[in-house]
Image (cartoon, rainbow, N blue to C red):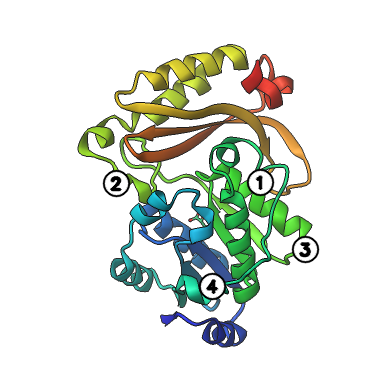
Amino acid sequence: MRTLKKISALRTECGKAVRPLVLVPTMGALHVGHAALIRRARQIAGEEGTVAASIFINPIQFNSSKDLALYPRLEVADRRLCRELGVDILFQPSAKEMYYEDCSVFVEEEVLSRGLCGASRAGHFRGMCTVVAKLFNLFAPDAAVFGAKDYQQLAIVRRMVRDLNFPIRIIEHPTMREKDGLAMSSRNIRLSPEARKVAPAIYQALLRAKANTGSPHQVLKKLRRDLELIPGVRMDYVECVPAISPESATHWLQSTVIAVAVFLGEVRLIDNIRIPQHRPNSLKKAANCSQA
Ligand code: PAF
């Protein structure tokens, strides 16, 4: 594995890499979920192709300096895991390497970023799009793998790739879960033991919402109530939105995603579940169901 910290070295390495080159962008604190993304990248790249990963805690996608400071940093363990997983190129730049002090060009998606995490984390998706666009320019990958837990991020990245004509296939990988159902996240290690114990209740509530055959309004109301019953929880949002087609960002499907964000103590957790198309009652109104 070649570990690179400089953009110039990365460009050289990617220039001579065997294609296809498949990228897994991360912010580190790697866990089994990331390992699954990297294994998926290897499947797509094949034995001969190149698997690349980036580890960069992108300061401009944090809307709170406290959240940025507390984000877990496990550089050595991350490098070891990447090596074990057969990553060929690892890019681990500093913030100084990635951003000029007076940088003034950013990438902003203006529609899909409005709600959900975009509403509660001002500037988050602008920072995310900017760094992902930079990584796409630097690696020039043939494909990139993103997890479905960050559902809105995935939809926005697809839209950016479409609108800015990046010749890159975006691969969605299903949310990886702990045995008790908690969605894997680098933030989970910051949960207190008490919070960790109750955190699986988020997914259990989502499963009940999926099984609930009521109207979107009824389903969301019950889901909110279920989430509020989790000890120590503070709600950020509970919403349903039309699911974007995994194949293309050019149209919306009739199926719906229920997405939630909650705080457990200081830790913000997100999760989502897809409600299938055949569901009775409603899906035409799904886009507005949070206001119902
Ligand atoms: O999902 C993440 O870890 C980050 O948002 C990403 C895509 C690596 C950009 O910083």
Which of the two marks, 3 or 2, is nearer to us in this view? Answer: 2
Q: Position of residue 180 (x, y in %)?
A: 31, 35
Which of the two marks, 2 or 1, is nearer to us in this view? Answer: 2
Instruction: Say whether marks 2 and 1 touch (CB < 8 Å).
Output: no
Q: CA distance from mark 4 to mark 1?
A: 30 Å
Residue bearing the label numbered 4: 98
Residue bearing the label numbered 1: 246
Disc assigned to residue 165: 3
Residue sitting nearer the eye, 282 or 236: 236
The answer to which image quadrant residue 195 occupies is top left
Is residue 115 toward the left or the right of residue 120 in the image?
A: right
Residue 162 visible in the snapshot: yes
**Residue at figure coordinates x 34%, y 39% from the top left:** 266
Instruction: Say whether marks 3 and 2 touch (CB < 8 Å).
Output: no
Q: Position of residue 64 (x, y in %)?
A: 45, 48
Q: CA distance from mark 3 to mark 4?
A: 22 Å
Residue bearing the label numbered 2: 190
Disc 3 marks which amino acid? Asn
Disc 4 marks which amino acid? Met
Residue 279 visible in the snapshot: no
Q: Is residue 137 above or below residue 16?
A: above
- Disc 2 residue: CB within 8 Å of ligand 1: no
**Residue at figure coordinates x 36%, y 35% from the top left:** 181
| Mark 3 / mark 2, whichever is N-terminal | 3
Quadrant into which the N terminus falls? bottom left
Q: Secondary structure at mark 1?
A: loop
